[in-house]
Image: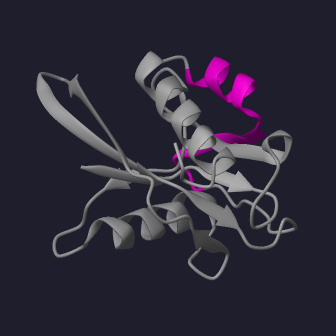
């Protein structure tokens, strides 16, 4: 399983036009754009993995993030003949001045509003997940 913390929102209950999504561009393969994510280490729970991977890939640790409770989206798709599951969660960046520090796995990053994030993400299931996450934030979890 992969896990991710995908969104940055400006303020505790941000207006929809201030929501930005963190996407990282891989430095390998097709150079695709995704939120931070990675494989679960033995003994880790989902949240621990999401926080660790976000810190490793973007330099954003648990001191930089505030979890948005209640949103969890699962994606399933084949990779090299095997089923892959990715869990997406949502967190807000506590301090908007916090810098993203990329790992060697990525060559670029972007904080993007939903329309641009969906254009960069390209895959329909990820676009649907980003849209659902934004809707969840906009409605304060009351969908």
Q: Which residues are magenta?
A: 103-121
Residue lying at the far left in this picture: please name it. Answer: 82
Q: Mark yes or no: residue 27 visible.
A: no
**What is the x, y in percent for residue 80?**
18, 23
Q: Is residue 97 above or below residue 10?
A: below
In front of the other: 52 or 19: 19
**What is the x, y in percent for residue 65?**
63, 72
**What is the x, y in percent for residue 59?**
63, 67
Left or right relative to 70: residue 39: left
- Which residue is painted at 73% across and 59% down in the image? 100
Q: Mark yes or no: residue 115 visible.
A: yes
Q: Is residue 118 magenta?
A: yes
Q: Is residue 31 above or below residue 102?
A: above
Q: Quadrant of residue 76?
A: top left
**What is the x, y in percent for residue 90?**
53, 56
- Which residue is painted at 70% across and 61% down in the image? 101
Residue lying at the far bottom in this picture: please name it. Answer: 63
């Amino acid at each position: 399983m992969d896990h991710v913390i995908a969104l940055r929102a400006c303020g505790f209950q941000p207006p929809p036009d201030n929501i930005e999504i963190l996407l990282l561009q891989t430095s390998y393969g097709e150079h695709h754009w995704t939120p931070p994510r990675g494989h679960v280490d033995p003994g880790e729970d989902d949240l621990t993995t999401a926080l660790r991977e976000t810190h490793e890939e973007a330099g954003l640790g648990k001191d930089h993030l505030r979890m948005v409770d209640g949103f969890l989206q699962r994606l399933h798709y084949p990779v090299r003949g095997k089923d892959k599951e990715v869990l997406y969660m949502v967190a807000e960046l506590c301090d908007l001045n916090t810098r993203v520090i990329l790992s060697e796995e990525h060559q670029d990053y972007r904080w993007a509003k939903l329309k641009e994030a969906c254009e960069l993400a390209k895959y329909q299931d990820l676009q649907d997940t980003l849209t659902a996450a934004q809707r969840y934030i906009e409605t304060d979890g009351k969908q």
